[in-house]
Amino acid sequence: MIASLSRKVNGNVQTNFAVSKYSRFFSSSNKLEKHFDVTIVGGGAVGSALANLISENIPSLSVALMDARTPKSPNDAFNIDSSSKTCFPSPRAYALSPKSLSLLGDDIVSKLDEKGRLAYYDTMQVWESDGPAVLQFNHQDIDDTDKLNGDILGAVVEDEPMVSCLWDKMKNNSHVELISPTIIEKINAPSASDDESKVEVMYKKAGNDNAEPSNLTTNLLVAADGANSFVRKSDGTFHTVSYSYGRTAVTCTVEIDSSIHKTAFQRFQKNGPIALLPVWNEDSSKRQGNCGDKTYANIVWSTTPEEAKYLKSLPEKDFVMAMNDLLQSGPTNTPPLFPTELKNSLPRPFQSAMNGIEMLSQSANTGLTMSGMTERRQGFRVAPMITNVVGRVFSFDLNLMHAKNYISNRICLVGDAAHTIHPMAGQGLNLGMGDAACLTKNIKHVVESGMGIDTNAGLDYALKQYESSRQREVVATMGGIQFLHGAFGTTFSPAVHVRSVGMNMINSIGPVRRKLVKVATGIEDVVSI
């Protein structure tokens, strides 16, 4: 719906500017300048969640949310036509912790759940390909007083429906201006010593090469525009470090032959983990359209670039077989502790001693696995069988990126603009949501204290508190994931034995296991360990 409107801006009347259902984009023919307290570039999951959090928690601030695209309306995002080829979930989905779900808001979570587009899981099973160890986390590992969102460990939600719901909520919010589709052409940040000037943003409407640029000023510019952030790169004061994992993620949506029973599965191999995650509520009656009784899951398979290329080249039948071979295989024995060549080169008494040590290690580790299952009364759960792939198979390279500084002169980074990590622990978006919550909390503190964010003093304090808190958490998370990447990537037999025993110890020692669950669900920070 397009409307022709007039409004008074800075004492002048501005007329005939187009406003779509989501976009309130003003004409730049008279080059009028608008001012906002906070301007967020990037209207994806983190950026739109941040805009929503600020508008709800600090309603005295004006917020602009800018993006190159305008999300679909919820009706379009939720609509599923059973006669079309789109009657299945998107592989672009996230595993959100209960803490992140709470940051979305009960209204957004309820809407997603009512439409059947939220797949809760209350159990997570992790096991290795070269040992007997099994880690099983479930909602019972969380005390009732600590539970954030009921008896769950998290939920998988597709990107498009989530973002469309957030934008739909903000489109009638007088505190938020949605500016899209738009292209930013230039950003001018004031010097650190300039207490009066604000950040200037020059932009124009996307898709119209003849459009004249518009301008706005803002007390704070937030970059939420992804790993290749235009804001971060154009400012020139943000320095990053990066590291290639040497791995590629292969992801797709698959149909499974039975219920996944609210379980997230992940099996580690030397080249990387393969995960099978629930997606869509299994009650198909909740979804618009008629997709029958089909049950879907998402695959995220981290492996070498060479194997990823090979997997994508396989016929569907062979690709499905490769996935089932890994996910249907349960725990196994650890490899020999000593190389066969070494044992054969030694006298028989030494060979016998080495064989005895290996048998003792195998027995002890297997015993730990069985005792952990017995103590918890929870046996190994076999993943459901994959029957076919639906939609395209995607792949993307896995890289770590971290900005050495998250803040500069009235500019700050959130989400992937500040950090990217390996998806093995599903913490990418959860870290971004943590950024949004932390930034909102610190801005609210200085606003309520009377300092505000108009002057450098108040804003600098809020941003420094944000940077200090989030960098500690992000770096600690990155370190933990890097440790897992190295531990499960090793083929050194003694290290494999130690890792396997360590996994079993974690599974068997309640306080340690419950501590990890609290971190994974967002109840506690990584730095609290």
Image (spheres, rainbow, N blue to C red):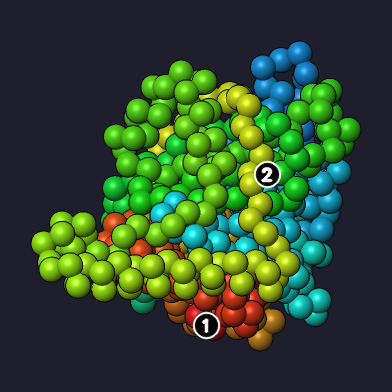
* Residue at (81% x, 65% y) in the render: 150
The correct choice, above or below, for 428 with respect to 137 in the image is: above
Asked which secondary structure carries label 1, the reply is: loop
The x, y position of residue 209, in whole percent, is 45, 24
Pick the residue in front: 343 or 191. 343
Q: Amino acid at mark 2?
A: Pro
Left or right: 214 as drawn, with respect to 354: right
Quadrant of residue 3 within the rendered picture: top right
Q: What is the distance, in whole Å, between disc 1 and disc 2 at their CAs?
A: 29 Å
Query: What residue appears at the point 74 percent right and 36 percent down from the top-left corner?
Result: 258
Of residue 325 and residue 9, the one placed in the foreground of this image is 325
Residue 477 at what x, y percent from top left?
46, 69
Binning the other alpha carbons within 10 Å of mark 2 as few (below 14), some (14 to 19) or many (20 upward) gives many
Question: What residue is disc 1 on?
Answer: 529
Amino acid type indicated by mark 1? Ile
Question: Can residue 440 be spotted in the picture?
Answer: no
Q: Which mark is residue 278?
A: 2
Whether 306 is drawn above or below 228: the answer is above
Q: Which is nearer the eye, 516 or 497?
A: 497
As helix, strand or loop, the secondary structure at mark 2 comes to strand
Residue 36, horizontal then vertical, whole percent: 60, 58
The picture quadrant where one finds residue 5 is: top right
Residue nearest the viewer, comparing 458 with 500: 500
Q: Is residue 110 above or below residue 448?
A: above
Q: Position of residue 32 (x, y in %)?
A: 56, 45
Q: Quadrant of residue 304?
A: top left
